[in-house]
Amino acid sequence: MFSPSVANLVAQLTRLPGVGQRTAQRLAFHVLQQPEAEALALAAALVEVKERVRFCDQCGNLTEEPTCAICLDPRRDRSVICVVEQPVDIVSLERTHEYHGFYHVLGGALSPIEGVGPEQLRVRELLARIEAEGVAEVIICTNPNLEGDTTSLYLARLLKPLGITVTRIASGLPVGGDLEYADELTLGRALEGRRVVDA
C-alpha cells in the first residue's frame, strides 16, 4: 500500500506513546506535504536532542549539562527531596510553583511483572544523596497506581529507619470534580488525605 520509506516512517511513528496506526499515517502524510526545509528541521531537531540531552548526574533530570539548572539553583531548599518516577513529572510539579526543594528521578516504578526491581531504579543514588546532603524530608511523588503505590511503600520502609520524615503526596478528587462521578478508590484516598480547614 505504501512505498517502503513511507511504511518505515509510519512504523517508526507508531512506536511513539499514544500514536496508533491511523495517527501515524496522518503524521507521515503531514510530513510528506511539508516543504523539505521543515521536514529536515524536524529530523535535525530529533538528532540534536538525542545527541545533546542527557540525565543530570545528581538528580536524573533531563539536561544538556552534567548538572541540571534545578540542582544548581542556590535558592532551593536542600533539606527536601521529592522523588518522582520520570523527568516529565518534574515539569508537572514545577508548574505548580509550590515546591522549592530538590528532585530525584527513579527512572520508573517497581513492577515485578515487568521485571523492574529496586536494582533497575536509582534507589542507591537516592540513599547516597540523603546521606551526603543531610536531607530531612523525602516526598514520594510516584503515580497513584499499583506500581507507584508499591514503590512508595518500598521507599518508605527503606527510608524511615534513617530518621528522616517520609511523606507521600495526597491523592483524591480533582478540583472541580463531582462526588457523584468519583469511584470508591478515589473517594477513599480523598478521605485519607483530608486536612484541617482553616476558618
Image: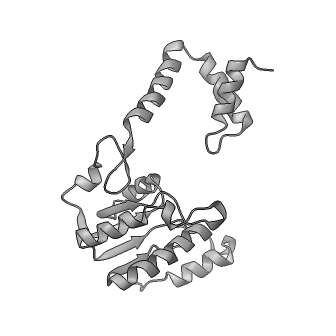
Give the total of numbered labels: 0
Q: Nearer the viewer, residue 94 or 46?
A: 46
**Residue 145 in view here:** no
Instruction: Note whether 63 is above or below 26 in the view shown.
Output: below
Q: Is residue 150 visible?
A: yes
Left or right position of 37 against 73? right
Q: Quadrant of residue 165?
A: bottom left
Q: Nearer the viewer, residue 135 or 27?
A: 135
Choose top left, top right, bottom left or bottom right for residue 22. Answer: top right
At a point 41% along the width and 53% down the height, the residue shown is 91
- Tell me the quadrant of the picture where the N terminus can be found: top right
Above or below for 56 versus 172: above
Left or right of 85: which side holds 166?
left
56 displayed left or right of 169: left
* Horizontal and vertical percent position of residue 8: 68, 25
The residue depicted at 69 percent of the width and 31 percent of the height is 11
Which quadrant of the rendered structure holds the C terminus?
bottom left
- Closer to us: 128 or 182: 128
Q: Is residue 160 above or below residue 14?
A: below
Residue in view at x 45 percent, y 61 percent:
106
Q: Position of residue 87 (x, y in %)?
A: 43, 53
Q: Nearer the viewer, residue 166 or 33?
A: 166
- The picture places residue 164, in percent across and down from the top left corner, at 32, 81
The image position of residue 72, as x and y in percent, is 22, 53
